[in-house]
Image (cartoon, rainbow, N blue to C red):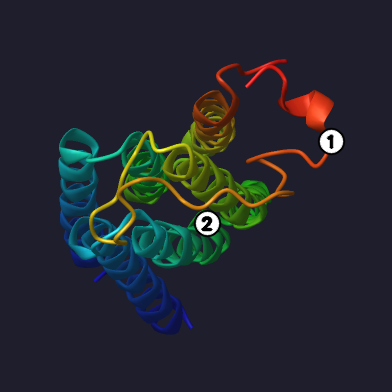
């Protein structure tokens, strides 16, 4: 039962990443692209956690945690760059 | 007990995937950036939370060891989601206010009106506005 749920969730998250990629390419503003990239990172974290359950190893949690931190810092840096024209003032 | 855990894990995984999909669908479907912020910040974060809770139930039941990594990721994501949304909304308002990104859906074509004292737009002290 868990196997079927994991396969279905893989399909749903892949579709979610595709939809975010559509918004990333389409735009229309740069803030939209930042938001789409942030959504893609969060979906990728969900995919990594799901893959960890699928393989039943805990090796992937460090990767998910690192991706969460790097995604947050990247989004804030992009937004700060749009806001001020500089990241570290 | 095993069957109960299996049902709970499957339901949480399916709910998490559905919420992630709904969040991205909102990102594609909604008309302007301020409405588009709702999908990823609420639904997608909740979807990832569902996945992580499922994994928190899975590993003690099937592998026999408890790990606090999932709790760490969940807490981190739930703390940073409002911060990123705030930063993106602030950058968007700033660009609309200075007329860089006009948004036809919000009927803002020529930039927002300039208030006298708002943190990111124009300082109340004239010497701060010299370089802009």
Question: In this figure, what is the number of numbered marks?
Answer: 2
Q: Nearer the viewer, residue B46 or B89?
A: B89
Q: Dot 1 corresponds to which residue?
A: B125
Q: Position of residue A83 (x, y in %)?
A: 56, 31
**Eyeballing the image, is A82 above or below B6?**
above
Between A81 and B108, the one lying in front of the other is B108
Give the residue displayed 58% in from the left and 44% down from the top: B87
Q: Position of residue B54 (x, y in %)?
A: 46, 65
Q: Judging from the image, what secondary structure is the residue with disc 1 in?
A: loop
- Residue ID at (50%, 62%): B49
Which of the chains bears the disc numbered 2? Answer: B
Give the vertical position of A57 relative to B132 (above or below): below
Q: Which residue is labeled 2 in the image? A: B59
User: Separation of disc 2 and disc 1 at Cα?
Assistant: 58 Å
Q: Judge the density around disc 2: few (<14), some (14-19), many (≥20) Cα neighbours within 10 Å.
A: some
**Quick one: label 2 or label 1, which is nearer the N terminus?**
2
The subunit letter for the residue under badge 1 reads: B
Question: Whole-percent x and y of residue B63?
Answer: 51, 54
**Eyeballing the image, is B105 above or below A88?**
below
Name the residue nearer the viewer: A10 or B78: B78
Q: Is residue B27 left or right of residue B66?
A: left
Give the quadrant of residue B95.
top left
| Residue that protrudes farthest toward the front in the picture | B126
| Residue A11 drawn at (x, y percent) | 15, 55
Label 1 Cα crowd, 10 Å radius (few <14 / some 14-19 / many 20+): few
């Amino acid at each position: 039962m868990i196997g079927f749920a994991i396969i279905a969730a893989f399909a749903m998250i892949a579709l979610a990443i595709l939809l975010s990629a559509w918004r990333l390419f389409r735009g229309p503003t740069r803030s939209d692209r930042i938001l789409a990239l942030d959504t893609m990172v969060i979906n990728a974290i969900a995919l990594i956690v799901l893959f960890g359950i699928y393989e039943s190893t805990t090796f992937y949690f460090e990767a998910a945690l690192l991706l969460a931190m790097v995604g947050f810092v990247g989004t804030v840096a992009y937004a700060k760059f749009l806001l001020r024209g500089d990241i570290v003032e | 007990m095993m069957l109960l855990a299996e049902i709970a894990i499957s339901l949480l995984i399916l709910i998490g995937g559905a919420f992630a999909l709904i969040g991205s669908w909102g990102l594609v479907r909604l008309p302007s950036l301020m409405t588009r912020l709702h999908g990823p910040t609420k639904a997608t974060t909740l979807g990832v939370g569902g996945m992580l809770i499922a994994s928190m139930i899975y590993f003690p039941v099937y592998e026999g060891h408890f790990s606090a990594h999932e709790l760490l990721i969940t807490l981190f994501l739930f703390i940073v989601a409002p911060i990123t949304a705030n930063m993106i909304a602030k950058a968007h308002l700033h660009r609309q206010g200075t007329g860089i990104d006009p948004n036809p859906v919000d009927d803002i074509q020529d930039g927002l009106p300039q208030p006298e004292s708002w943190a990111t737009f124009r300082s109340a002290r004239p010497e701060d506005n010299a370089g802009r």
